[in-house]
Image (spheres, grey):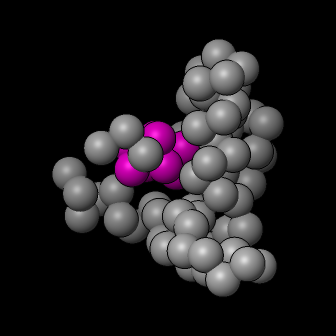
């Protein structure tokens, strides 16, 4: 499962030169999706609708990466 998850998530440095997971090819942090899911109780479908540039697979991949 880890190989499939890694296709959706890449580790890059933020402005403060700290390594952070981002969705591959986007400027969207995994942290942003996790906050929407955990703090605001949004479903994967709701998150994908709010981030209209992301697919359901990308959202699932990001959440899988975080919870592994």
- The residue at the point 74 percent across, 54 percent down is 53
Does the segment drawn in magenta span residue 63?
Answer: yes
Please tell me which residue lies in front, 14 or 30. 14
User: Principal SS element in the magenta part?
Assistant: helix
- The residue at the point 39 percent across, 50 percent down is 65
Q: Is residue 63 above or below residue 40?
A: below
Rendering coords of residue 64 (x, y %): 38, 42
Rendering coords of residue 9 (x, y %): 47, 64
Residue 24 seen in the figure: no
Does the segment drawn in magenta span residue 42?
Answer: no
Please tell me which residue lies in front, 62 or 39. 39
Please tell me which residue lies in front, 68 or 50. 68
Q: Which residues are magenta?
A: 58-65
Q: For residue 22, what is the image quadrant?
A: bottom right
- The residue at the point 59 percent across, 38 percent down is 34
Please tell me which residue lies in front, 43 or 15. 15
- The residue at the point 69 percent across, 31 percent down is 36
Q: Is residue 49 above or below residue 17?
A: above
Left-right relation of 29 to 8? right
Left-right relation of 45 to 40? left
Q: Is residue 9 above or below residue 47?
A: below
Rendering coords of residue 5 (x, y %): 34, 56
Residue 28 seen in the figure: yes
Q: For residue 66, what is the image quadrant?
A: top left
């Amino acid at each position: 499962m880890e190989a499939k998850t890694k296709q959706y998530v890449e580790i890059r440095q933020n402005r403060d030169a700290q390594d952070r997971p981002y969705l591959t090819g986007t400027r969207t942090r995994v942290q942003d999706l996790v906050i929407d899911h955990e703090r605001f109780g949004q479903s994967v479908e709701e998150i994908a609708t709010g981030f209209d540039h992301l697919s359901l697979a990308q959202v699932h991949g990001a959440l899988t990466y975080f919870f592994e």
